[in-house]
Image (cartoon, coloured by chain):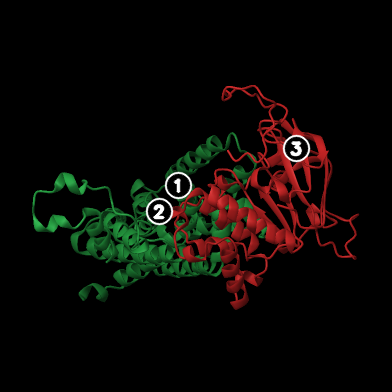
Chain colours: A green, B red
């Protein structure tokens, strides 16, 4: 495994594993509350943070974290107060964030190539300090998404009911938004800001094709996330293709494969659940009788026995 | 069916209401939905909130749980102003079924366990909590579906799960928003039985209903709303239903005769 001989690849693989864990871990709550595209919005806002990092000559990762956390809090506030004009305010925030990023990068004298590595991810540019930042941020995301899973589940499933169980609904909503923002910056170096959201949503969508419970969906989504980030990173090392795009395409391939698998699985599950169920409608025995010995058994009875196995 | 007498213990005098609304006003958007309603539910009582669509009955219960902000008036729960009320384990809430649909699969047990969070410290469920969840599922006859996805359930079964979720915290007060809407006959009976057992054990119940239906024998008092005001507060009117309520346009054709519109126990 000469791939592990290079320090930059070790860093890239570590970052990839952390992204594979954290993105689906917070993404499942976003999907559950039907805010699947929230990560995309935060990704746009984070661009301003990256530009600010270039301009102030400080770490783009920490700057992006600060700005995207601020943006996510703003998005949550808009959701509370601006019910009717909420989508327009969000659009302003997204595109303002993107334009701000491009503008600040240009003011800092940077080239589009600098920004490009943040937009689409890049392996060779993951620095030691990036890895430290990513590890710390990922630890926060894991702590929140697993430690508070019951509370986050309740709030994401049914906000109105969660309020009556006495949960601090607004605080938990805010925490979800902030955690999503932190995840965006964790994933930024590997998959890039424009494709971050895909890694939050696609593994969850793929997992739920074959699962029935939230807990199993969570575990399968994280497993898919880690597989595709490692797979994509390794592929991009050998084939010289962009890692972000490879990872997202692999995730979509996983989704398609599991969807194809889901139909027969659901059918087998349905059979197991209701063994004594009535058989499907068949041709009445008399109509199909052609004198063969087997036909003496009523068609319906055979089907019922077959279904019971 | 004869309503069982309420067990009112001596220390809980009838004067102390469990839910109390005084002059409550609320708006949705800028449209006034509640225009100053008074409502008191006493310990052990079963009160039905009736009214046509848009009369404000759902909004009224949603102000009680704090989901809809009030613009004026006072709300108290167990004698505490709602803003300062923290003892949510005493309240079980069953929302309208449409509000409880997540985008990710979840099992019946996972959904019902959420109802136990008000009694679990830091969201950690212990042995007793898991037992309470199981008991709640047994009460509504859904224990055999515990591991199934809620997406695979019928409307009536789903409603039973939501009631189990409210019962998981073993509440003293049940607030239900249209528990019978879109529920098949078999589930309606299970729900009525469950509610009867709760009432026998001394639970207080406030429910929003479209019509009294199979719950009629359980109900002590009916409050009828019309355009955000209380129109009637007293014993459930006979033959009340969506059809008999003011503001209901009776447009569907009759089966031939124009007899007096006395219909009891309407189920659909």
Instruction: Tell which of B158 and A233 is nearer to you.
Output: B158
Q: Secondary structure at mark 3?
A: loop
Query: Within the image, what quadrant is residue B246 found in?
Result: top right
Position of residue A91 relative to residue A200, above or below, is: above
Describe residue B216's horizontal placement relative to residue A140 as left or right.
right
Q: Is residue A51 visible?
A: yes
Q: Closer to us: mark 3 or mark 2?
A: 3
Q: Position of residue B142 (x, y in %)?
A: 52, 62
Q: Are marks 3 and 1 on the same chain?
A: no
Q: Position of residue A160 (x, y in %)?
A: 63, 51
B118 w.r.t. A50: above or below: below
- Work out how far the residue at label 3 is from the one at label 1, CA to CA, in angstroms: 52 Å
Q: Residues within 10 Å of mark 3 (few under 14, many from 20)?
A: few
| C-alpha span from label 2 to label 1 | 8 Å
Q: Provide the residue designation for mark 3.
A: B238
The front one of B16 and A208 is: B16
Instruction: Please tell me which residue is depicted at 59% across the width and 47% down the height of the picture.
Output: A74
Residue A219 - label: none
What is the spatial separation of the Cα atoms under label 3 and label 2, in whole angstroms? 54 Å
Residue bearing mark 2: A201
Chain of the residue on which disc 3 is drawn:
B
The answer to whether marks 2 and 1 mark residues whose Cβ atoms lie closer than 8 Å is: yes
Q: Quadrant of the C terminus of chain B?
A: top right
Specify whether A14 is left or right of B31. Answer: left
Q: Which residue is mark 1?
A: A37
Q: Verify CB contact (< 8 Å) between mark 3 and mark 2.
A: no
Q: Nearer the viewer, residue B1 or B195?
A: B1
Query: Where in the figure is residue A181, as x and y percent of width and height?
Result: 51, 55
Total residue callouts: 3
Q: Residue at x 49, y 42 (%)?
A: A94
Q: To which chain does the residue with label 1 belong?
A: A
Residue A124 appears in view: no
């Amino acid at each position: 495994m000469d791939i592990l001989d290079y320090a930059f690849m070790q860093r890239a693989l570590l970052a990839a594993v952390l992204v594979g864990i954290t993105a689906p871990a917070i993404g499942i709550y976003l999907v559950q509350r039907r805010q699947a595209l929230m990560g995309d919005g935060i990704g746009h806002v984070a661009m301003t943070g990256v530009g600010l990092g270039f301009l102030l000559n400080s770490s783009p990762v920490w700057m992006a974290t600060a700005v995207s956390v601020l943006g996510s809090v703003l998005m949550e506030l808009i959701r509370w107060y601006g019910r009717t004009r909420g989508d327009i305010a969000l659009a302003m925030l997204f595109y303002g964030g993107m334009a701000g990023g491009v503008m600040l990068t240009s003011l800092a004298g940077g080239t589009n190539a600098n920004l490009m590595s943040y937009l689409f991810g890049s392996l060779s540019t993951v620095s030691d300090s990036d890895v430290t930042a990513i590890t710390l941020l990922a630890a926060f995301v894991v702590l929140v998404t697993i430690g508070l899973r019951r509370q986050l589940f309740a709030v994401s499933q049914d906000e109105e009911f969660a309020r009556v169980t006495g949960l601090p609904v607004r605080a938990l909503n805010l925490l979800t938004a902030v955690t999503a923002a932190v995840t965006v910056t964790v994933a930024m170096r590997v998959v890039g800001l424009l494709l971050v959201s895909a890694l939050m949503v696609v593994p969850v969508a793929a997992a739920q094709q074959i699962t029935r419970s939230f807990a199993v969906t969570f575990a399968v989504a994280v497993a898919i996330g880690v597989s595709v980030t490692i797979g994509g990173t390794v592929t991009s090392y050998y084939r010289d293709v962009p890692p972000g795009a490879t990872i997202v395409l692999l995730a979509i391939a996983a989704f398609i494969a599991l969807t194809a698998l889901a139909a027969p699985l659901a059918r087998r599950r349905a059979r197991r659940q209701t063994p004594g169920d009535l058989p499907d409608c068949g041709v009445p025995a008399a109509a199909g009788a052609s004198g063969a010995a087997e036909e003496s058994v009523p068609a319906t009875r055979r089907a019922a026995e077959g279904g019971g196995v | 069916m004869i309503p069982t007498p309420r067990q009112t213990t001596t220390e809980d005098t009838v004067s102390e209401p469990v839910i109390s609304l005084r002059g409550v006003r609320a708006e949705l958007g800028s449209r006034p939905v509640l225009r100053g309603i008074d409502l008191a539910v006493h310990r052990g009582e079963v009160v039905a909130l009736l009214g046509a669509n848009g009369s404000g009955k759902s909004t009224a219960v949603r102000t009680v749980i704090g989901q809809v902000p009030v613009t004026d008036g006072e709300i108290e729960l167990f004698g505490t102003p709602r803003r300062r009320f923290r003892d949510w384990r005493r309240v079980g809430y069953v929302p309208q079924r449409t509000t409880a649909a997540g985008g990710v699969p979840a099992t019946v047990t996972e959904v019902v366990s959420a109802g136990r969070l008000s009694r679990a410290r830091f969201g950690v469920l212990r042995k007793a909590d898991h037992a309470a969840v199981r008991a709640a599922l047994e009460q509504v006859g859904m224990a055999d579906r515990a591991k199934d996805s809620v997406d695979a359930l019928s409307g009536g079964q789903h409603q039973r799960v939501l009631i189990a979720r409210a019962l998981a915290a073993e509440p003293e007060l049940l607030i239900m928003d249209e528990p019978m809407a879109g529920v098949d006959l078999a589930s309606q009976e299970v729900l009525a039985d469950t509610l009867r057992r709760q009432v026998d054990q001394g639970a207080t119940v406030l429910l929003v209903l479209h019509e009294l239906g199979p719950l009629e024998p359980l109900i002590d008092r009916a409050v009828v709303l019309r355009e955000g005001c209380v129109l009637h507060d007293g014993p459930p009117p006979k033959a009340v239903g969506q059809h008999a309520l003011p503001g209901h346009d009776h447009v569907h054709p009759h089966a031939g005769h124009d007899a007096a519109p006395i219909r009891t126990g309407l189920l659909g």
